[in-house]
Amino acid sequence: MSATEEVIKPDFAGQQKHFIFNEDHDRLRESIGAFVEKELTPHAEEWEETTFPDSVIKRMGELGFLGLSMPEEYGGQGGDYYCNLVLAEEMSKSGSGGLAMGVAVHTDMAMPPIHLFGTEEQKQEWLVPAIKGEKILCLGITEPDAGSDVSGIKTRAVRDGDEYVINGSKTYITNGHRADVIVLVTKTDPDAGYDGFSLFLVPMDAPGVIREKKLEKLGMHASDTALLAFQDVRVPASAMLGQEGKGFFHIMWELQGERLIGAAGCVAGAQVCFDKTLEYAMERQAFGRQIGKFQVIRHKFAEMATKIEAARQMTYMTAWRFNNGEYPVREISMAKLYSARIAVEVADECIQIHGGAGYMKEYGSERVWRDMRLNRIGAGTDEIMLDVIGRSYGL
């Protein structure tokens, strides 16, 4: 380099978007971000005490945010999978993990199986109004005696003429108290192993569906979580979602998209917590200077930023493969595992940087930790993710 050439300096403030996003995604991000800032964030504290109202789902449907990657013929926006990532990331800025979770269950957990496996009649009955925000969805997998071991599900659906009679129970069901329909995992043939499961679309107002209890949780207070019972619930044979006996495989496919969206939400949530804590560190004074100027604090931020960026790149690249038709279960499991872990780690470190203030509800760090902690359990525990990854290598 000659003496006359300008020295190239690092551009730490440069904002280079990832290649998976284009201008349409940028506009979508701005639109959702404005909605979140204006209509959701101001109510975060209130909804921690009351849970968010159903009107939020209705409003998001009116704005076209509930069917971003769904076909236009059903009222969706016809976008790609990356649009769902944008929604998950922007919802993380609401300050309410429970709200983000409730919306994600509707849009990214219960809706995709209806779209992929549903008949035209089922799509018109449930998918179209769900995209409009007129019907709320939930997903029923976990039972009191069957969590990570999905094969242990005991809820039975027995054929009786042109109907099925369903008996059993489900627990930890997000949106369970507000939902209009549940995508229910049942066992239709107890002797067929993994080929003995089937999915059903069960209206939550059907006789025999009992919303037994609103469960109290460590975090995600803004979402409702239910213990449900099904006592001789009769549904027509046409309520079956997808192929009989293929329910286990249908729901395993659903879990991959759920885990990837969860990873994106974890990364975004960790970034929000990081940013707010960075502002605090630049304002808080101790021993005559900003606490962020102390090496020990500076290194904490450096560690957190590095892990957040690693999780982000892993999630985006895996999303790129998923969007392009691949089924990268190993990498999805890695992204979910790592993102969930670093989100909890970042939230914990942010509490530490805040000191006593971090333990107080006023600053919000403790809520982020409580909300994020679920991600190491829901949609596949850390232990299950590790086992999936290990088995993928033939171990």
Image (cartoon, grey):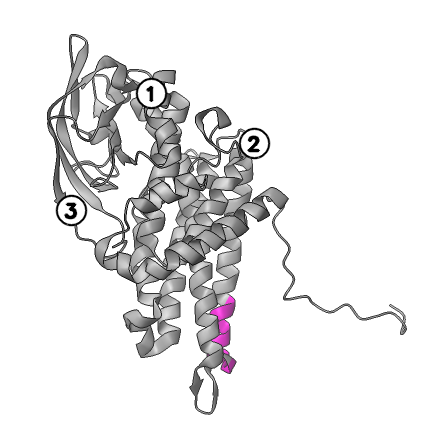
The residue labelled by disc 1 is 122
Q: Which residue is mark 3?
A: 214
Tell me where residue 167 sits by quadrant. top left
Q: Which residue is mark 2?
A: 324
Image coordinates for residue 188, horizontal then vertical, percent: 20, 18
Q: Are marks 3 and 2 in contact (CB under 8 Å)?
A: no
Q: Main secondary structure of the magenta part?
A: helix
For numbered disc 2, what is the local secondary structure? loop
Distance (Cα) linking label 2 and label 1: 27 Å
The span from disc 3 to disc 1 (Cα, nearest Å) is 28 Å
Q: Which dot, 2 or 1, sits closer to the camera?
A: 1
Mark closer to the chain start, 3 or 2: 3
Give whichever of discs 2 and 1 has the lower sequence position. 1
Three-letter code for the amino acid on which mark 1 is drawn: Gln
Q: Report if residue 68 lies within the magenta region.
A: no
Q: Which residues are magenta?
A: 293-302
Front tag of 3 and 1: 1
Where is residue 37 drawn, in percent x and y?
Answer: 44, 58
Identify which residue is drawn at 29% across, 72% down.
359
